[in-house]
Image (spheres, rainbow, N blue to C red):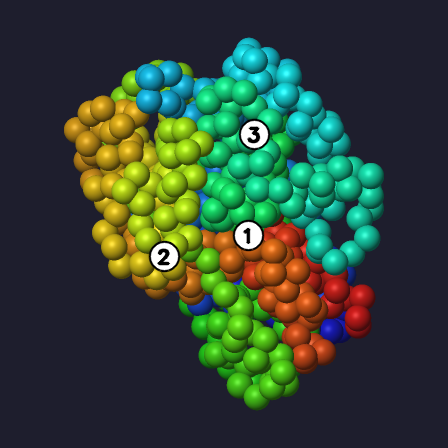
């Protein structure tokens, strides 16, 4: 095995995870990255002004800190440091108050009042058993779970819509909070599986928290790269692979790219049947993202929002549901749900002294060309009057900009493809990571378990390749 060579196309979190698994097994591993810097969507850049460091893609990392694979690696020894804000998440409302969720689940009795016990009863079995639960929920769907009773309990809830699960709560505040978690699904909140995303996001908020890496998400990528190098792995940046035919020296080829790119580089490598199935893969909604250099912290009407690195902006369950429904119809919302991160409140390395950064996006139809800036900033102003007065500079990244900077973000889709009932099973085909070519595997977020910075797509794909060898 030590004499065999493998390569990975793409150095996103899944590509690096796959490379590490292969290198741990004794293979000589090369990683090819088209961009000048490794990381894919997990990069940090000066996108606005000098000295202001912004996360290009993902900024807050519950699934990374809670990843069964990443947590098994000595990443802290390679420079990674997690920062947990005092509160996990904040969700401001139109009455000037904000619901602030603490990591300790028992505190939900105080923050959620009448719905505190219902919240705890819903989530506690999975929070208490995150170590076991995560291995199943972040694994391939079509396999026997290692903890069948726990997964059966989750499965009963997972097929429900967010609307159905939120109906368990009596207060507007608790329903709004759950809507914010469920909106991470990019599904309509009345669609099956939207409840599963809401559940998973809420579980991580208590089980592992929603931390940020000190100095930005690039720190996570750098730690993975550093550890890979100790195993003998090599990363070749600014090295775009245009054809798999150029990789004939490798016994394994793992591709951290989406089905569209795989078809482009494969040529005649795959069977016609497999290529036809890849062509049927559907991409999901995109995002419209804005990075801000700020002269001061965001002036939230509810000052409690300053305790959380992540803020969900959308108001009530009904408001958020309307926003997501518009996106599903191929329209843009007048009052879009906005996901906002304010890392410099807790990490002074992100901006010059006394200054701050913010990162925000809203959902839009795939490849949308609509300018959402005023709508997005109106939503921030709705809960933080005077926000625009704090802006020193902004960098707008529309769906086309995101795809240009990372080819995996097709049409601005940041989760590797639509994740509805059909594509939860066929991701991208029933064979999952395997292709019609025995030595080529797909390991991107277009495979199970899907989007999120957890590395588990790469982990499972690499292990399949090793088993089959």
Q: Is residue 111 visible?
A: yes
Q: Name which of mark 1 and mark 3 comes first in the sequence.
A: 3
Residue at 29% from the left image edge and 34% from the top image edge: 379
In the image, residue 389 above or below residue 198: above
Q: Is residue 219 visible?
A: no
Residue at 55% from the left image edge and 38% from the top image edge: 162
Residue 355: image quadrant is top left
Q: Name which of mark 2 and mark 3 comes first in the sequence.
A: 3
- Say the numbered circle drawn on residue 167: 3
Residue corresponding to mark 1:
451
Q: Position of residue 465 (x, y in %)?
A: 73, 68
Front-most of residues 11 and 182: 182
Residue corresponding to mark 2:
330
Which element is circle 3 on?
loop
Front-most of residues 282 and 390: 282
Q: Nearer the viewer, mark 1 or mark 3?
A: 3
Q: Position of residue 213 (x, y in %)?
A: 49, 37
Q: Nearer the viewer, mark 2 or mark 3?
A: 3
Residue 97: image quadrant is top left
């Amino acid at each position: 095995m030590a004499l065999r060579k493998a390569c990975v196309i793409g150095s996103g979190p899944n590509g690096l995870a796959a490379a590490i698994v292969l290198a741990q097994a004794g293979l000589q591993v090369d990683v090819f990255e088209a961009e000048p810097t490794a990381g894919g969507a997990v990069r940090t850049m000066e996108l606005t002004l000098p000295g202001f460091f912004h996360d290009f893609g993902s900024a807050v990392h519950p699934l990374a800190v809670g990843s069964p694979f990443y947590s098994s690696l000595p990443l802290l020894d390679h420079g990674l440091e997690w920062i947990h804000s005092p509160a996990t998440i904040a969700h401001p409302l139109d009455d000037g108050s904000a619901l602030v969720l603490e990591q300790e689940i028992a505190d939900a009795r105080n923050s959620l009042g009448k719905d505190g016990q219902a919240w705890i009863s819903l989530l506690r079995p999975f929070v208490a058993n995150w170590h076991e639960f995560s291995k199943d929920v972040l694994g391939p769907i079509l396999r026997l779970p290692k903890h069948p009773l726990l997964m059966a309990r989750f499965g009963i809830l997972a097929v429900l819509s967010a609307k159905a699960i939120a109906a368990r709560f009596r207060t507007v505040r608790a329903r709004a909070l759950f809507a914010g978690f469920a909106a991470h699904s990019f599904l309509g909140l009345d669609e099956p599986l939207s409840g599963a995303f809401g559940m998973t996001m809420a579980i991580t908020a208590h089980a592992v928290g929603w931390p940020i890496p000190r100095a930005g998400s690039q720190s996570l990528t750098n730690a993975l790269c550093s550890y890979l190098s100790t195993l003998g792995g090599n990363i070749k940046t600014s090295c775009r692979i245009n054809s798999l035919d150029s990789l004939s020296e490798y016994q394994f080829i793992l591709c951290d790219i989406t089905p569209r790119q795989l078809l482009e580089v494969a040529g005649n490598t795959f069977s016609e049947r497999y290529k036809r199935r890849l062509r049927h893969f559907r991409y999901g909604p995109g995002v419209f993202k804005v990075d801000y250099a700020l002269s001061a912290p965001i002036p939230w009407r509810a000052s409690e929002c300053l305790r959380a690195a992540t803020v969900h902006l959308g108001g009530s369950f009904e408001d958020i549901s309307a926003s997501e429904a518009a996106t599903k119809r191929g329209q843009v919302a007048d009052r879009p749900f906005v996901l906002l991160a304010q890392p410099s409140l807790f990490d002074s390395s992100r901006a010059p002294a006394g200054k701050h950064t913010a990162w925000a996006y809203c959902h839009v139809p795939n490849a949308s060309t609509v300018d959402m800036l005023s709508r997005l900033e109106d939503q921030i102003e709705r809960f933080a009057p005077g926000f625009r007065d704090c802006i020193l500079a902004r960098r707008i990244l529309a769906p086309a900009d995101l795809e240009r900077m990372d080819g995996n973000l097709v049409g601005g889709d940041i989760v590797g493809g639509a994740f509805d009932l059909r594509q939860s099973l066929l991701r991208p085909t029933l064979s999952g990571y395997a292709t019609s070519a025995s030595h080529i595997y797909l390991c991107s977020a277009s495979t199970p378990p899907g989007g999120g910075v957890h590395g588990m797509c790469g982990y499972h794909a690499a292990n399949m390749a090793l088993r089959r060898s």
